[in-house]
Amino acid sequence: MADKKFELTDLASGKKSLLPVKSGTIGPDVLDIAAINRDHGVFTHDPGFGFTSACESRITYIDGDAGVLLHRGYPIEQLAEKSSFMEVCYLLLNGELPNRPDLEKFTNDIQHHTMLNESLLRFYNGFHHNAHPMAMVSAVIASMSAFYHDSMDIHNPRNREIFAHRIIAKIPTIAAAAHKHSLGQPFVYPRNDLSYCANMLNMFFAVPCEPYYIDPVAAEALDLLFILHADHEQNASTSTVRLAGSTGANPYAAISAGVAALWGPAHGGANEAVLSMLEQIGTVENIPKYIAMAKDKNSHFRLMGFGHRVYKNFDPRAKIIRGACHKVLESLGQTSNPLFELALSLEELALKDDYFIERKLYPNVDFYSGVIYSALGIPRSMFTVMFAIARTVGWVAHWQEMISDPAMRIGRPRQLYTGSVKRDYVGVEKR
């Protein structure tokens, strides 16, 4: 399809341009619009970049209409059922699933990079006790660039690999330290003998005065949640990492920018908003009233956790996480969890309502993830941090892909200017 082209005609002048069409392995074709400014003196206008391909990528593919999510070609359903987060990390970073020796080496490398420099750990004492954990996580990640000068040559493949292993290994430690600082508890050091998620749970909940039992079901649930959140194509935070990284900024600065973007309630804070909504609804009897409010254009109430910017049918991750929610609550003896029961009833009633059916507003991954985090004892302020831990590998994979692309250019969107035309300065005494 290399010779396929679209013809663009200026109806006023009759001038024509031929726009080349680029085809991916799957998914819609894209138009190469580079010639339209040269030929017609115009730019395209696409607020929110919802219909613009800003890069080529081989990492993740989404078909929002069909509810398909593929990582390096593998369906998310298969990865969630059969894989592990460490294996998915390797897949996203390297393009292929590892054999056993490669997976063991990769896992070992991650397990032995988990400690933070003591000077970096003392940074937390400079934060106020009620600072938001995302503020601490973003700041500490950015500060890591002050500690690793010897391995920040972004054009050196080995340096990029070291950075990838280092940030994926340390992000749970950084997050756990933020959590402990918020509680006023002593930091808990990582343990190299524990799995990625078991180690994170230990750092979050262990205290020096008594032993801490790591529930394998809780660790398994976290592993699944991390798989489901590992990457999601060119979302706002990933695009932020790419844009910051395109300047040649050090990779820690780029990841810190991604954390800041994820912090927004419209992006990473959605699962926290779902729990707040469920608490606002209160009881099953109130659901019809709130569904009516969600349909009322004059109401400010929104039904959080339904619908998705990309998925126009169903979110494939939501089906997986719904089942995991049942398993976790049963294991923890919370089968009568009121928030979960309320969520199930809300889902059932909403999916029978023509308003939601016609608009294809189905539950997304955020609808149940907050319930699981809450059941595991993770405070609501840490929900977005958990998202950041999982998404770090996706950010790193996209950053690596971009930096190693010979055609990489600094990101520079254009604009439609609607301000004042040229005017002359008038002194203050004459205004």
Image (spheres, grey):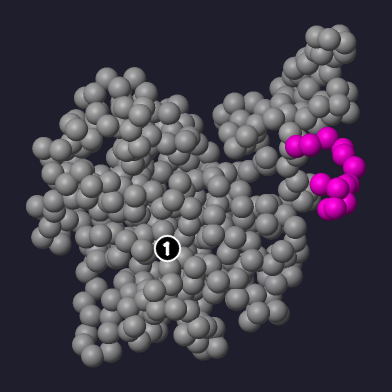
Percent position of residue 121, x then y? 49, 84
Which is nearer the eye, 372 or 109? Answer: 372
Percent position of residue 392, x then y? 51, 60
Q: In the picture shown, does residue 39 fall above or below 346?
A: above
Amino acid type, mark 1: Val
Residue at the image point whose x is 15% and y is 62% from the top: 332
Which is nearer the eye, 162 or 388? Answer: 388
Q: In the picture shown, does residue 180 fall above or below 255?
A: below
Q: Which corner quadrant holds the N terminus? A: top right
Magenta stretch, main secondary structure class: loop
Query: Circle 1 is placed at which residue position?
Result: 385
Question: Horizontal placement of 352 versus 188: left or right?
Answer: left
Residue at the image point whose x is 35% and y is 67% from the top: 197
Q: In the picture shown, does residue 256 fall above or below 205?
A: above
Residue at the image point whose x is 48% and y is 57% from the top: 263
Quadrant of res 281: top left
* Residue 425 among those drawn in magenta: yes
Q: Residue furthest front?
A: 429
Crowding at mark 1 (Cα within 10 Å: few <14, some 14-19, many 20+): many
What stretch of residues is rendered in magenta?
419-431
